[in-house]
Image: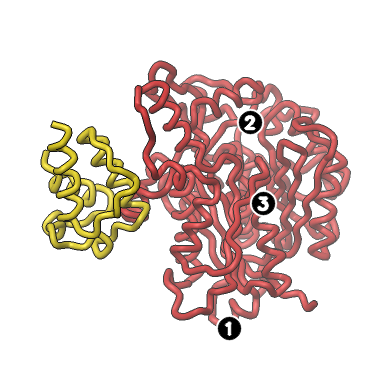
Chain colours: A yellow, B red
Amino acid sequence: MDSLNLIREFLDGRLGIPPQQVVPDAALGTLGVDSLMMLELVFECEDRFGVTLDKRLNSPNTVGELVALVDRLRSEQN
Amino acid sequence: MTQRRVAITGLGLVSPFGGNLADFFARLLTGESAVRFLQTNDLPRPLNMPFVDCAGFDAEATLGRPLAGTLGRFAQLGVAAAFSAWDDAGLPRKPQNDERDDWGVAWGSALGGVLAFDKGYRDLWQNGRERLSPLSIVLGMNNAANAQISIQLGLGGISTCHSVACSSSAIAIGEAFRRVRDGQAPVMLAGGSEAPQAYAVARAWEALRVMASADEQRAARCCRPFAAGRSGMVLGEGGAALVLEDWDHAIARGASIHGELVGYGTTCDHSHLVRPAVAGQVRAIRAALADGQLAPADIDYINAHGTATPEGDPVEIAACREVFGNVGSGPAVSATKSMHGHLLGAAGALEAIITVLALGGKVIPPTAHLDPLDPACAGVDHVTTARHGQPLRAALSSSFAFGGSNAVLAFRAVTS
């Protein structure tokens, strides 16, 4: 599964956000992802892809920023 | 300070029968038991015991997926019960302005979010996981239910969780009552919720040798308060909530009033952690009566703590006899745990609701399966089948917890 689809699946499953709204330009906060749910989303990405997001990184603001971050870590891992 | 009268304007619960409040009470009146035999498929150690669960409760359907997903089972049951009571009170979910800045929540739970940590131990020790979901803390914290109730209903005053074993929600209701009566809050949401089906919790209760033992066929009839040969209590999950409201506030907005909360007494036996004492219970009953300016002769019904343990039941009956005298002069007594089980920290709230419905409906629910009576529990007017058409004036609901923490609530019927 690619990173965008994982995020879509998570937001649909946890918050009932329709996948078509989860596009790269969408702001995570506007979608309803608060700081707690952001932690859970990061945890899910780490868990599913076996990557670790550095705690010191700035929290991504948009879906696209999170996708890019996770994709970069996944490629570094490979 | 001028004391306010305290109206009960909302009642709500999550019913183990799956229906609404009216359905729940109607079933109790017929003596129907919600106890079933719980068998989990947990490996390597499944739970097998008589239990009362709310199998028909669909948290996502009731609360919505985003809210349900951030709550543990006890908080899901609690928020659902609170919503139900709030709706029953005719109050909108969202505040219109800042009118609710001093409205509050007093909740009760003995175990709180223990299931979140139960899952954590399984994940770490059994399932080979290296870390836990960051949501675990908010799922497990014991003030999760009251905090989320305050958030959802926009209540800006006190928000607290009382953890006093099996008196938790009775004490929550009592403390909330005092806030409304003293004029500190025009509205308080009070109640409790519990989800005790954690493996170590259930086995710990079994180790105390106070749990009713029964197989699948006998489970429904195994909780027998005051009966000869009773073997103990049955754990249950659930949530129950009451809206307590300044009487004038309720009248001004045209609310329906289910009953009046008039007295609260709480004491400690200060003698033993698990062996109850007559003297401490008598003091609690008398304190509730005095607080409500009631004489023993004013009380027509007592919803007893009645857990069906061999040790506890005779002590409670002895306390009733000391306050009210022998059968013939005293109030009717029943223990509805025979049907809905022991909800631990939520028990006091569930039984307070039953007591209010009894007063309002002029009907007394029975102690189910009370045959034959244990002679050690004789001497009060035991109700073994529902009594309809009773001119009930006032009633008590008793909670006598481990730790010797006693709480008694006194209610009056609304006279029109």
From the top left corner, tell me how far across and down residue A48 is, in percent.
Answer: 22, 35
Mark found first going from the N terminus, 2 or 1:
2
| Disc 2 chain ID | B
Q: Residue at image x 67%, y 66%?
A: B260
Is residue A48 shown left or right of residue B75? left
Tell me the residue that label 1 is attached to.
B252
**B330 vs B42: above or below:** below
Q: Earlier in the sequence, mark 2 or mark 3?
A: 3
Give the numbered dot on residue B170: 3
Q: Secondary structure at mark 1?
A: helix
- Which residue is drawn at the image coordinates 81% and 51% (left, top)? B285
Question: Which residue corresponds to mark 2?
Answer: B224
Question: Which amino acid, mark 2?
Answer: Arg
Q: Are marks 1 and 3 on the same chain?
A: yes
Answer few, some or many: residues within 10 Å of disc 1's Cα (few below 14, many 20 plus, some between 14 and 19).
few
Query: Is residue B212 rendered to the left or right of residue B319?
Result: left
Distance from the alpha carbon under mark 2 to that under mark 1: 44 Å
